[in-house]
Amino acid sequence: MLKRKLVRDQMGFSINVPEKPMRIVSLVPSLTELLCDLGLENRLYGVTKFCIHPEEVVSQKTKVGGTKTFHIEAIKVLNPDLIIANKEENDEELILKLKQHYPVWISDIETLDDCLKTIREIGDITDTRKHAERISEKIRQGFSEIPVPPRKLRAAYLIWRRPYMSINRRTFIHDIMERCGLENVFAGEESRYPEITAEQLKKANPEVIFLSSEPYPFSEKHFEEIEQLLPDCSVVLADGEMFSWYGSHMMFAPAYFNKLMDEVILPLTKA
């Protein structure tokens, strides 16, 4: 019989898991990538259709549906001994149904510190602590070396179009913006992902607007409509994964933000 241990997830639930889980299902794209970077690809049995990294691994795994529309029957077939979920990304009602049958470990991530904690805790749960520590330290060190601009740059980060949607201070993206010397002009909005009118966008008067590549696929063709609203504002196409994929993907983020700092942020703060 496999040895088991009692662990607590980030929602405060206690779950009983094997000391070395062997049949893992991940319902969180960024944490699927983390599991693979921890060397667990052979113990990963099921993923969502939005789990795209690493492509050569996830293309071979069973797809159990979307992050909010996963199919419980498809998961039952895989007989998992650990399911990785997230408070925001997964449907609460479906997760609670899963918890009746399987150990579901739920993460709750709003900051880079939460991200680093999650990496270490998943390392503990999956018996890959040393590897998790190396990944966590690489991310921490990389972000510590991002230069601090001479002043904060007023910025809006848009994740959707028609209607425009942004982010408030209770989001991972906001924390990343802060670490790059960006002042989120919609930080004080009540909703985590507030709908923003064109008038609100003009009134906020950001110096730079980031158009995220996900979940809405903004591209350069959308620059003109923003520039018509705010002709004096710089518009930048942002790599949404670098701003929002908490997990091991953050190992690549410091290099991206250093480039963004050199090409966009520092020139604008000195203007």
Image (spheres, rainbow, N blue to C red):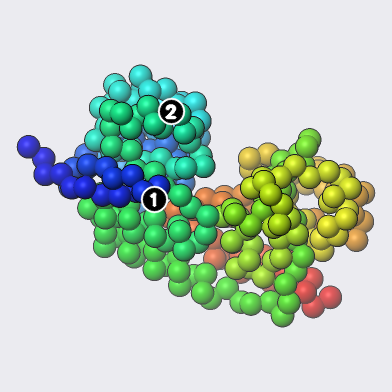
Which amino acid is tagged 1?
Gln
Secondary element type, mark 1: loop
Residue sitting at the far top: 73
Q: Which residue is drawn at 51% across and 39% down?
A: 89
Please indicate whether residue 86 sits to the left or right of residue 188 in the image: left
Give x and y (percent) for residue 173: 60, 55
| Residue 218 visible within the image | no
Q: Name the residue under label 1.
A: 10
Residue that carries the numbered disc 2 in the rendered image: 94
Rounded to the nearest angstrom, the CA distance separating label 1 from label 2 is 18 Å
Task: Look at the image and tell me in which quarter the C terminus lies.
Answer: bottom right
Please tell me in which quadrant of the rendered image residue 96 appears: top left
Q: Which residue is at 49% across, 70% downward?
A: 142
Q: Do the residues labelled 1 and 2 touch (CB within 8 Å)?
A: no
As drawn, is 3 to the left or to the right of 67?
A: left
Q: Of callouts 1 and 2, which one flags the residue occurring earlier in the amino acid sequence?
A: 1
Q: As displayed, is residue 3 above or below residue 142? A: above
The one of 75 and 190 positioned closer to us in this rendering: 190
Identify the residue at horizontal 71%, vertical 57% (top origin): 188
Name the spot of residue 267 as percent of width and height, x first: 77, 73
Image coords of residue 130 (percent x, y)? 26, 62
Amino acid type shown at disc 2:
Leu
Residue at the (77%, 74%) spot, across then down: 269
Secondary structure beneath disc 2?
A: helix
On the rendered structure, is 92 left or right of 189? left
Residue 122 in the image: above or below residue 65:
below
Classify 221 as above or below 233.
Answer: above
